[in-house]
Image (spheres, rainbow, N blue to C red):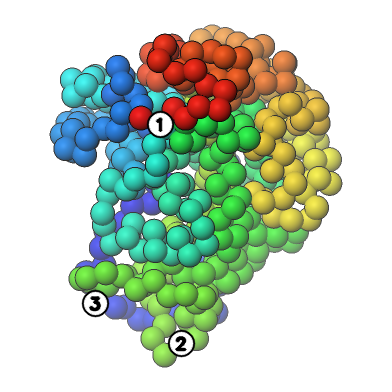
Amino acid sequence: MSDSASDCSEPRRSPVTEAEVEALVRGICFKTGPPRFLGVELEWLVHEPRSPRLPVPPALRETAYAAVRALPLSSTVTVEPGGQLELSSAPAASLMECIDSVSADLVAVRAALREAGLALSGLGQEPWHEPTRFLHEPRYDAMETCLDRTGPEGRAMMCSSASVQVCLDAGYEEPGPLGLGRRWQLAHQLGAVLVGAFAHSPIARGRPTGWRSTRQSLWAAMDPGRTSAPPLDGDPRAAWARHVLDAPVMCVRAPSGPWDVPEGLSFRAWTRSDAPPDQEDLDYHQTTLFPPVRPRGHLELRMIDAQPGDDGWIVPLAVTAALFDDPEAAETAYRTVKPLAERTGSLPAPANPLWTTAARSGLADPELREAAVTCFAAAADALPRIGASDAVRQAVAEFTDRYVARGRCPADDVLDGVLDDAIGTGHLLHDTGHPLHDTEHQLHGKDLRP
C-alpha cells in the first residue's frame, strides 16, 4: 500500500475541469520508451522472533522504526497503517542492481530490528492477530472510515497484509512484445498466474481461511470502484483516465482536523461541483486507487504476496522482470496466458473467476499450473539474457522444482504444517526461513490466537 502522503497545508490551487483531468491522466499514467528501469516494493510483517504470536508493543515498534529510519539506505522506508514495514527501491538499471541494492538495505534493516528484539516476517497476511492500526494519521483515519462502509476487508488489508510489488517501465509506444498495449494486457492475464504461484497467506486469526492467498481475497471483496482494473479493451490511457474520473473519492483533505469522507462522490462528479478539486487533489486521488496493476508513469504490479525467508522476494522479482523485459520470454508469456482470458467472464481483475481461482487454489488449478510451468521455463531461459547471477537463477530453479512443477505454492507449505497435524504454526516462516514450532497448540479446529 505504499502511498503515504503528507497532510494538506497549502492554499487550494486552480480547480481542474473534467476535460483537464482526462488530459492530465492520459499524459502522465503511461510514460513510454524502452524498458530500462526496474523497482520493487517489499512490505513485511514485523514480529518478536521468539514469540511471534504475541502483539508487538507500539512503543517497541516506535523505537525500532526510528532506528531503521536513521539508516543510510538506498531504499525508501515507510510504515504501513498496521505497522508493516516497507522498503521501496530506487529505480534500478538492471535486475541485479535492484537485487543487490535492496539486499544490502535489508541486511542493515534486519540488524537494526534485531537490536530491538524484532524480526521481519515474509507472509502475505498476518496469521494471528485482529487488524489493529498502528498509525493514526488523517489519511488512514479517512481510509478506515471509507473502507469500513463496504465491509471488514479494507481494514484487514490496511493493517494485516504484506506484498511484493514489482515496478516495470510501461514499454514502447509501438506494438510488439515490449509495447505498452501488450505489457498492459500481459500484466493482467499473467497476474493471475503470479497470484497462484506466489500465494502465501492461507491463515488469518489463527485459522485456515480456505484461500491460498487470503490477501488477494481481501482485495477482491473490497469496493470494486477502488480495487478493480479498468476494461482492457481499447486504449489503456483512455481506459485508465475514465477509471480515475469514475472512481469514488476517498477523502477531501483539510489543513487541520479530520478529513471529509464523502459517500458516493466520484471524481468526475467532484469536478462538476461548486467546489471542484485541483491538480493536487487529482494526484492524491490516484494514490487511493488500488487496482492489481496501477499505472504511475510505470506499471506497478500489486498482486504478489510477501514471500518466505530472507530472500524469497527475489524469485517473483526475477521471474516478473524476465517475462516482461526479455522480448522472447514476453512473447511466450503472452501467448501462454492469453487463453486464460476466457475464464475471466469478461469481468475485471481481481474479482473475476480466473483471479478468484488463483487466490483460492493456487497452482492446484490445472490450467494455472500449466501456464505457470511454461512461463517459469521461459523466465529461466531469459534470466541469463537479462544478467541474472547464478545464485538468482538457482533460486528460481529451486522454486520451480519445489512449487511450480508440483502444482504447489508457498501457502501449501503453511497448510501442510496445519492440516497434517503439524505442531503449532507449522511452516509459518519468519526471517530465518525456518518453521516456527509451538508444542502447546494442536490445530484441527482449534484457535491459535494468543
In the rendered structure, which amino acid carries the disc numbered 1?
Arg
Labels 2 and 1: the sequence-earlier one: 2
Image coords of residue 362 (percent x, y): 68, 30
Residue carrying label 1? 449
Residue carrying label 3? 11
Residue depicted at x 45% and y 60%: 148
Q: Given contact means CB atoms under 8 Å apart, are the residues at marks 1 and 3 in contact?
A: no
Considering the numbered disc 3 on the image, is that residue within a helix, a strand or a loop? loop
Number of other residues with Cα within 10 Å of mark 2, as a class: few under 14, some 14 to 19, many 20 or more:
few
Res. 371 in view: no
Considering the numbered disc 1 on the image, is that residue within a helix, a strand or a loop? loop
Quadrant assignment, res 332: top right
Task: Identify whether 438 is placed above or below 19.
Answer: above
The span from disc 3 to disc 2 (Cα, nearest Å) is 19 Å
For the residues carrying marks 2 and 1, which lies nearer the camera in this image?
Answer: 1
In the rendered structure, which amino acid carries the disc numbered 2?
Ser
For the residues carrying marks 1 and 3, which lies nearer the camera in this image?
Answer: 1
Residue depicted at x 35% and y 81%: 14
Image coords of residue 382 (percent x, y): 66, 21
In the rendered structure, which amino acid carries the disc numbered 3?
Pro
For the residues carrying marks 3 and 2, which lies nearer the camera in this image?
Answer: 2
